Amino acid sequence: MEFKNKSGKSYLVYIIAAIAATGGLLFGFDTGVISGVLLFIREEWSLSPESQGIAVSSVLIGAMIGAIVSGKVADKFGRKTVIIWTAFIFFIGSVGTALAPDLEWLIFGRIIIGIAIGVASFAVPLYISEVSPTNVRGALVSMNQLAITIGIVVSYVVDAGFANVEHGWRYMFGVGVLPALILGIGMFYMPKTPRWLISKNKFDEAETVLKKIEAKDNVQDEINEIKNSITEESGGTFKDLLLPWLKPALIIGIGMMFIQQCTGINTVIYYAPTIFQKTGFESEQAAIAATSIVGVINVLFTIVSIVLIDKIGRRPLLLVGLTGMTLSLGVLGLAFMETETLGASLKYVAVASTLVYIASFAVSLGPICWLLIAEIYPLKIRGVAMSIATFSNWAFNFLVALSFPILLERIGPPATFWIFALLSIGGWIFCYCYVPETKGHSLEKIEEHWKAGKHPRELA
C-alpha cells in the first residue's frame, strides 16, 4: 500500500510515528493516573506521607530497571521488537494494579508498569528518530511527547470520571489495558528501522523501508552514509560512552535529564490535586477538575513546540521555556507564603502560576530533552546511550517524587518551589553554555561533529 500524495510526499512515516507514540500515551497515562488514585487510597489504606511517596515513586524504580537493562536488548533485537514486548508488560501491569488488595501488591504492580515506562521512554523516541527524515525529525519525535501529555490528560479525565464510583480507583488503573492493546497490535504491522537493519547487514530490507518512508526511488546515498558511520565506529558497549569524543554527548544527555526532572515537573504531574487541595480546592472532584486544566495546557503547548521545533530550533525554545518556569515557580512559592494576604485568591494564583509553569515546560524541556537524546548519540551505541540517559531521568524523577511530599511537610511549599526555581536558573545556564543546536543536521552529521572534537555549541 502506498501512503503518498501526487507530489510523492510519503505519509507512511507519520502513521508509523503515530502508532509508536501510543507508547508515549501509556507513559503519560500511567504517570498521571496515580494523582487521582492517591486521593482515595490514602484514606482507604490510611497512608502516611512517606507511604504516599513510596506508592507514587515505586513506578520509578521499575522505570530505572527498564531503562538500564533494555538498551542492549534494543540494539540486539531491534526497536520494534522491544516496543511490542513493552506493550505486553503495560497490559500485565495495568491488570495487576487494578486488582491490588493492599499497598504491597500495588507497589509491585506499579514497578511492573514502571519497567514498561522505562523502556518506552527511550525506545519510542529512538524508533521514531531512526525512521524520520531530517527535515521533520524534530516534529515527529516530539509526537511522543505530545502523546505523553495526551496520556496525562486522559488519566485526569478517567480519574474524574471514576471519582464518584465505588472503588473507582481500580477502574482508573484498569483503563490502561486499552492503549496497551493498541500499541502491541499496531507495532506488529510497523517496519523495523532502516538504521538498525543496516547495522545488522540487512541492506535489502533497509532499502525497502527507506524507499517507503522517504518516498523516493534512489536512497543509496543515505544507505552508504549510514554504512560508513557504522564502519568507522568500534564496539557498542557502555565502555564506549567514555571515549573522549563521546563524553560531551554523555554529559549533555545526563545533564538534560537532571534539568528536566529536578526543576519539578513531575511534582506537578503526580501531586497537582494534592497541591490544589492545599490552596483551597476542598473536594477531590474540584482538585481533579483543576488538575485537568493543567493537562490540557500541557497538550496545547506541546503542539506549539512541535510546530516551532524544526523552524526556530531547540536552543531558543529551551531558553524561553526555562525563563518562564523560573518566574512561575517563584510566583507559586510567593503565593504560598502570602496565604493570609491572598485568602481565597490563593487557589487562583496557584492555578495561574502552575499553568504558566506547565506551558513553559511543554514548549521546551518536555519534548526537547527526549528529542536531543535521540539525536546526539552515534548509531552503534544509540540504544545503550539512550538507556543511560533515560535511567538518569528516572533516577532523578524518583528522588524528586519521593522527597516532594516530605519537603512540603518539613520546609513548606514556598521553600520547596523556590528550590525548583533556583534549579531552573542553573538549567538555563547549562543549556545556554553547553547544549548544541541539532536542527537541520542529519544524525550522521551530528556524529561527525563529535568525532571532530568540536565544542557542542559549534554545531549550529
Image (cartoon, rainbow, N blue to C red):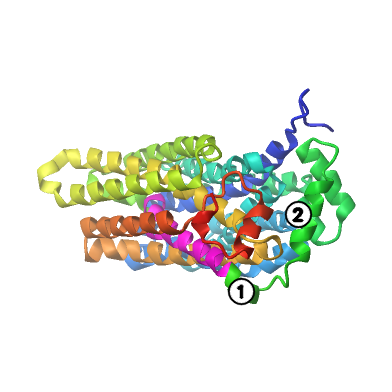
Amino acid at dot 1: Leu
The residue depicted at 47 percent of the width and 41 percent of the height is: 153
Q: Is residue 256 magenta?
A: yes
The residue depicted at 77 percent of the width and 45 percent of the height is: 190
Mark linked to residue 407: none
> Which structural element holds mark 1?
loop
Mark 1 vs mark 2, foreground winner is: 1
Q: Position of residue 411 (x, y in %)?
A: 22, 64
Q: Which of the pair 286/265 is nearer the observer?
A: 265
Label 2: few (<14), some (14–19) or many (≥20) C-alpha neighbours in 10 Å: many
Q: Position of residue 454 (x, y in %)?
A: 55, 62
The residue depicted at 25 percent of the width and 48 percent of the height is: 332
Q: Confirm whether residue 127 shows in the render.
A: yes
The outermost residue toward the right is 204
Q: Position of residue 192 (x, y in %)?
A: 78, 51
The residue depicted at 60 percent of the width and 62 percent of the height is: 450
The quarter of the picture where residue 238 lies is bottom right
Query: Is most of the magenta stretch helix, strand or loop?
Result: helix
Q: Which of the pair 388/195 is nearer the observer?
A: 195
Residue carrying label 1: 243
The outermost residue toward the left is 341
Q: Position of residue 130 (x, y in %)?
A: 70, 50
Please identify the quadrant where the N terminus is shown: top right
Tell me the distance, in whole angstroms, between the alpha carbons under discs 1 and 2.
22 Å
Residue carrying label 2: 195
The outermost residue toward the bottom is 239
- Above or below — where is 6 with respect to 222? above
Q: Give the tally of numbered discs.
A: 2
In the displayed structure image, the side of residue 163 where residue 96 appears, left or right: right
Amino acid at dot 2: Arg
The magenta segment is 246-269
> Which structural element holds mark 2?
helix
